[in-house]
Amino acid sequence: MAAQFGRRLRKGAATTAVAAAAVAALSASQAPGVTVDGRGGQATADTTPAPEETADVGATGNSPYYTDLPPLNSPHPSPSASTGPGAAGRSEAGIPATVLDAYKKAEAALREAKPGCNLPWQLLAAIGKVESGQARGGRVDADGTTLSPIIGPQLDGNGFALIKDTDGGAYDGNSTYDNAVGPMQFIPSTWEWAGRDGNGDGRKDPNNIYDAALSAGHYLCRFGWDLSDRGDLRKAILSYNNSTDYLNTVLSWLEYYRKGTHEVPDGTGTLPVDRSDDHDRVRPTPSAPATSRPGSGSGSTPGKPAGSGPSPKPPTSPGTPSTPPTSPGAPSTPPTTPTPPQTPTDTVDHLENAGTAKLTARAGDVFDERIRARAETATGKAVAAVRIRFTVIGDTDTTFAGGESVATVVTNGSGVAVAPALRAGEKTGDVTVRATVVGRMVPGLDYRATVTERVADTLVRTGDAELICAPGGEFADRVEVRATHDGAAAGKVAATATLITSADDAAPNDKGPYFKDADGRAVRTLTGLETDENGLLKLPRLYADDTTGTFLLRVTTAGGAALTVELTVAPAGTTSPSPSADPSENPGA
């Protein structure tokens, strides 16, 4: 009994100390016990909203999670067989090899795809620990797929969020309600847009740790969040599961793993014990006294006083909801399926355009207009607290702010959901954004956005040196121009350079200066040019044939900006001849 009490006392001390340290170090920017919900409001920590109020349910649907906290012992960089006071720290610091590799590869991928996010792999490890105990201690195959699916409890509104089926049971095997799935515990509706292929096998599998880790990284890096910023870090974690207790638990593991960790063989990771819904689950009542174990000598479980009954049933892993057993002798009652309560989503009949005007923006710019959709009943009544998913579809690089192609927004009291601002990509043309109701099969509503090319209204040379070349020679200076639009640098603007016949004839000249193509042949028109981010464009080197005179180079850009530059071909040491390209100014030519 003393040993068991000692373990509890140490665990309680560890819980208090680690949580206090994490909160003090990383959570000082917000009052304790308060979280920011998906609508920008505030909610008391770990309150369970009424089913119709459950709007933004994050990546996991606010599913249960493991609440075990790190030990007080600092982790060490290498495992040890010691069983002393530091053994717990070394054991907890060990992460199964394949799982650890997946976290680190996800960090590397995000460092390239979204460098401003500053995602640490230790954050993925902290979430993986809290969500599934590092894929149940690393029970994965060589490709990173869990040996058996990790399924959370059904989100039926009974102590959890109410999320009716969105995937036909494809991921979670449940065609009535959704369940969180996989080592990072994504609900199907989130996985639909957040899922990524992390191991390059062409599939997006929530039960694969490489896919799940990369998806979690992208999920945490949306909205332009910088995870090196304390405020953005908190927002990202709360968006995964909107609970202050969850936030503090993840922060505790994040700090613990940052102090040191090491690799352990797959399948040997430390399994967590306590889960956030332990108090909600019904434990079986023993029907008979515990039997003695061979060799115990007293009929008691080691570390437990005799006569105190059997040990409690070990907690199930996420997704294995407990069912109270039938008492002995109780009559058998056929199970009944309760009628799911009706939610606002169930009443939605259609979506309407809520006043979205024409959507047009130049490549790289943010659209001034934002997309608005209104959820309505069959009689046209507005429906609040409904999740609307906006998806940018088709072959385009236009995205929402933060680089994501999907955004889920909850309708307000007027039934209107306003999508995040759209940012035009570099591909021009029409883009379709589709609004759909999450959890409800009603026709989607399409919005068309048009991306136009970048333009410039002014072109000037960056230098004023005279451009002169001897016949058959090479111009010493290259022509460089700067493009602007409304006085600002016009970057990535398409341009064309042509050696023209005359000021009044823009046709390519058939003699005089020329550029060279990749094979060294003379060309007098260059297309496909583009200014850099600062609006600068430096043309390739120019060459001269044996024709002397003054010639004209014209540079034009999308948007109508144009600049004509004079080029002179003359023998060395002679004065510049009159322009051969304009006979009216050279009568003796």
Image (cartoon, rainbow, N blue to C red):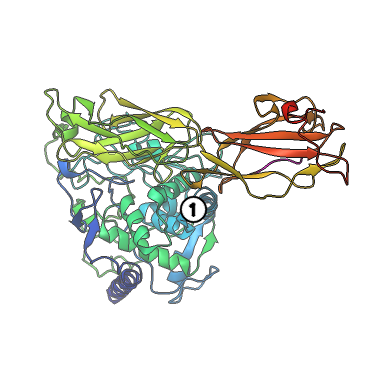
Q: Is residue 418 magenta?
A: no
- Looking at the picture, tell me which residue is in the foreground, 547 or 399: 547
- Looking at the picture, tell me which residue is in the foreground, 547 or 87: 547
- Looking at the picture, tell me which residue is in the foreground, 358 or 12: 358
Quick check: can you spot residue 106? yes
In the visual, does 238 lie left or right of 539?
left
Quadrant where the C terminus sits is top right
Instruction: Determine the residue located farthest toward the front in the rendered image.
Output: 587
Quick check: can you spot residue 293? no
> Where's residue 526, x and y in %?
69, 31
Give the residues drawn in magenta, as a range.
Answer: 538-542
Which residue is denoted by mark 1 in the rendering? 267
Task: Please report the residue visible at 73 percent of the width from the left and 30 percent of the height from the top.
Answer: 585
- Looking at the picture, tell me which residue is in the foreground, 433 or 187: 433
> Where's residue 308, x and y in %?
21, 65
Task: Please report the residue visible at 36 percent of the width from the left and 54 percent of the height from the top.
Answer: 236
In the visual, does 470 lie left or right of 539?
right
> Where's residue 141, x and y in %?
52, 44
Location of residue 565 (image quadrant): top right
Local crowd at mark 1 within 10 Å, few (<14), some, or many (≥20)?
A: many
Q: Circle 1 — which element? A: loop
